[in-house]
Image (cartoon, rainbow, N blue to C red):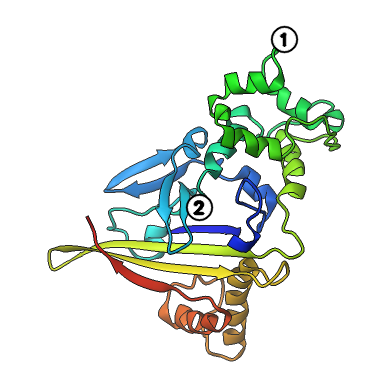
Amino acid sequence: NNTGGLIAPESDNNPWNYKFTWNPRNVVLAGQGVAQYLENGQYKYTPYHRLFTSVREYNIMDLGKFEMYPNRDSLKYREIYGIEDIKTIIRGTLRRAGYSKAWNVFVQLGMTDDTYKMANSEKLTKREFLNSFLPYHPTETVEEKLKRIIPDTQDEVVFNKLKWLGMFENEPIGLPNASPAQLLQHILEPKLALGPNDKDMIVMQHIFDYELSAKKHRKKSTMVINGKDTTHTAMSITVGTPLAIATKLLLTGQIKERGVIVPTKPNLYNPILNELENYGVKFIEEDVDVE
């Protein structure tokens, strides 16, 4: 299962091909736990410092290239969905191609660290913030040091992503008693915010590989939904509407269970999924050849 809270193509107008459609703090801190998954019967663990270099590419419908990085603990879903004997289970986060290589610069520098406060953070400019994570050199510029310490920034595309954020400018950040992650978030929020006419997009794709009659098969189940505006976002529709439908079913007596319930039973998920189609939330299924 791969899912991403992204920006609709018509609103995709920055070098990162990304805008915040979810809690910005969660985006900055994403991936800091070890990613755990199962692949071909082998347990796999991807630590934070390798997460954004462990991406896989996907072409999804007619939307072009995406990249996926593993998302936290995929193993726990085996028991939840009753698939304990499955050989492969991977849950991933989708971003547009090229995002992870640039984001990994922040990770490698230490800018996503939320465990300590930086001295005089309220006085730091963006350029000084960046320079705080680079060694002293009497003659090299910040740009030169960065390209030497983080070779990926020699890639013009990656470098321009950082430049677009204003990371090399002497503009004060103005955030007191802040961690590196908080300062980074403060820089990103105005640059990656949804504009007044922007629309977000949710892309979710399940890929099932299975054998039937001694033949290998693959089924893809894909959902793409665009938001209507900055209030009626795809994120709010896909997160809030299922709960609203479940509440209605509970109040009308169609759901008999009580307590905290995971919707893994047909009597719960079928009516919710059926009604969600009225809001444009539906999956397109296709069978593809397995090489």
The residue where tag 2 is placed is: 93
Q: Front-most of 246 and 283? A: 283
Quadrant the N terminus occupies: bottom left
Whether residue 191 sits left or right of residue 153 in the image: it is: right
* Circle 2 residues within 10 Å: few <14, some 14–19, many ≥20: many
Q: Quadrant of residue 99?
A: top right
Q: Is residue 290 above or below residue 154?
A: below
Q: Quadrant of residue 127?
A: top right
**Residue type at tag 1:** Thr
Q: Is residue 82 above or below residue 273?
A: above
Residue 289 location (% of width, % of height): 24, 62
Q: Which mark is residue 32?
A: none
Q: Is residue 227 above or below residue 257?
A: above
Quadrant the C terminus occupies: bottom left
Assign a secondary structure to mark 1.
loop
Q: Quadrant of residue 21?
A: bottom right
Residue 193 location (% of width, % of height): 73, 54
**Residue type at tag 2:** Thr
Q: Residue at x 62, y 28 (%)?
A: 109
Q: Which mark is residue 139?
A: 1
Q: Earlier in the sequence, mark 2 or mark 1?
A: 2
Whether residue 21 sits left or right of residue 61 in the image: it is: right
Q: Front-most of 109 and 89? A: 109
